[in-house]
Amino acid sequence: MDAVADEMKLLEYAVHQLPPLAVKQLIAHQVCVRCIFRLFNIHEGIYALICPTTLYAIIEKATEVEAATTESSQKSEVKSSICSVCLGVMQFSYRDQKDMLVEKDHAGDFAMTVAESVKEKYHEITSFTLEVSLPTLITENESVILSYMKKKYASEVWFQEKFSFEQIITVKDALKLSITHSLETLLGVKSSVSDFRIRLTYEHVDATSAENKTGKKQYNKRIKSGSNGFVKCNNEAMQSGDVSDSNFQMKKVGQPCHMTLTCSTEPVYIGGRYLKLSRNVSQTRWIIDDERKGDASVEELIGENILPVCKGDGYKFHAAGREDIDVRMLGSGRPFLIEIQNACRLPSEASIKEMEKKINSLESNLIRVKHLKILGSQGWSLMREGEAEKQKQYAALVWISRSISDADLEIVSSFKDLKVLQRTPIRVLHRRSPLDREKIIHWMKIEKIGGSSQYFLLHLCTHAGTYIKEFVHGDLGRTHPSIGSILGCRAEILQLDVTDVKMDILNE
Ligand SMILES: [Zn+2]
């Protein structure tokens, strides 16, 4: 309390130094008392914490404003009217999202409202950045006021000695300064450069204007053109003073701004590996002409189960490579990354384990996930880097047009790092440009199936991006060599599984 009392004394002293006439005129122009303090560079923080009535009392006492405004009703009107410069922002007066008028006496009360709506949704913030967005009308009006003062008082000693345009703290900064400390206390965390942003967006549409529906753009246009959208300031108190400035024009507003509070966070990245156990599940949501292809998608099965835990607005799915809808993904699984947008909650290690368990016990049993973990924002680049390096292993069920011999087994397994030239397959020509690409088959092995001479399992390990189906059947000679050309017969692929994806990322 002593500190506040001291501050009050300093404030009273500072106000005492103000030029009474200039203050009187600013009040007459409906400039709020906090903006007056701001314009005269007084004592940055404290005035935000003192209620306007007290502030007016101080000003009245110091500058004898009382004498100038004879009618007391007029005086109270001036006090309660919306500031012509800050449009109510520094009066902590605004219309909220439900269009309700909110008026707060102190910065602390306003901070309380902000903190409450932040806490309603976000529970685990560790710091915050406060951002404020204001209508340009505020800056425009401020420069009108300043040039008016310059014109009027440039010859005065106080103006030359103390008044400084450069030092004036902007409405934006004044608002931030006014509430940041209270917000820190109320939220229990520090303000810093943070991933968690609290954004106050102020917008103003003049409620008294008939053309107000067109909003801000129209507004700005009017300011620039200076047309009749402006009301020439003809305040009676002003005329009763010695002000007779013909070029002093400022938009008078009857309503404060609309204020919207939004919070946002950096995306949360959760990575892991997935297994796809079905030949009828696509990797990503696949809907053509309102018709879904396949039973489900890996993307949705994972995303829809993670999103609610993080309480996010949405998610994006990224995977290191892909397999066709009819190809299963087995073995160690394929690395993926889920990007949760605007997550209200950073999941704990325990809840990550829960997610994994939940996805793996889904009744549909279409996919599995493993090694789920929070990756931090470097996750995405990690995935990109990893993609270039990978090798993949497959198991293909193959049919050939003749019986398989032991010699075939030997020939096939004798190849090491076999170079294969693949022209863009016919089946993907509609989305890939026609190119010849060299791919490498690192090794191959045939596993015979008991009781069958024309069917076998082909195990192979290839360089990333090899088209396996084409490597088996040859794609009408567009892939060479192929299993068909090596064995000198027709070869068809019946089923394909990815059995391993070798990458340096997201391993156990
Ligand atoms: Zn103001």
Image (cartoon, rainbow, N blue to C red):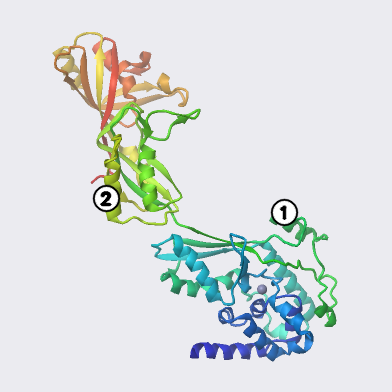
Provide the residue designation for mark 2. 353
Judge from the rendering whether residue 143 lies leftward or rightward of residue 355; answer left or right.
Answer: right
Which residue is located at x 36 percent, y 37 percent?
Answer: 298
467 to 366, vertically: above or below? above
Which residue is located at x 47 percent, y 25 percent?
Answer: 433
Judge from the rendering whether residue 332 lies leftward or rightward of residue 196; answer left or right.
Answer: left
Q: Position of residue 1 (x, y in %)?
A: 49, 88
User: As rendered, which of 104 and 60 lies closer to the eye?
Assistant: 104
Q: Which mark is residue 213?
A: 1
Which residue is located at x 83 percent, y 70 percent?
Answer: 247
Asked if residue 378 shows in the view, the reply is no
Q: How crowded is the residue under tag 1: few (<14 C-alpha within 10 Å), some, or many (20+)?
A: few
Secondary structure at numbered mark 2: helix
Amino acid type of the residue that numbered disc 2 sits on in the rendered structure: Lys
474 to 223, vertically: above or below? above
User: As rendered, which of 436 and 256 lies closer to the eye?
Assistant: 256
Secondary structure at numbered mark 1: helix
Q: Residue 127 carries which label?
A: none
Q: Where is residue 431 in the image (x, y as percent from the top left)?
A: 47, 26
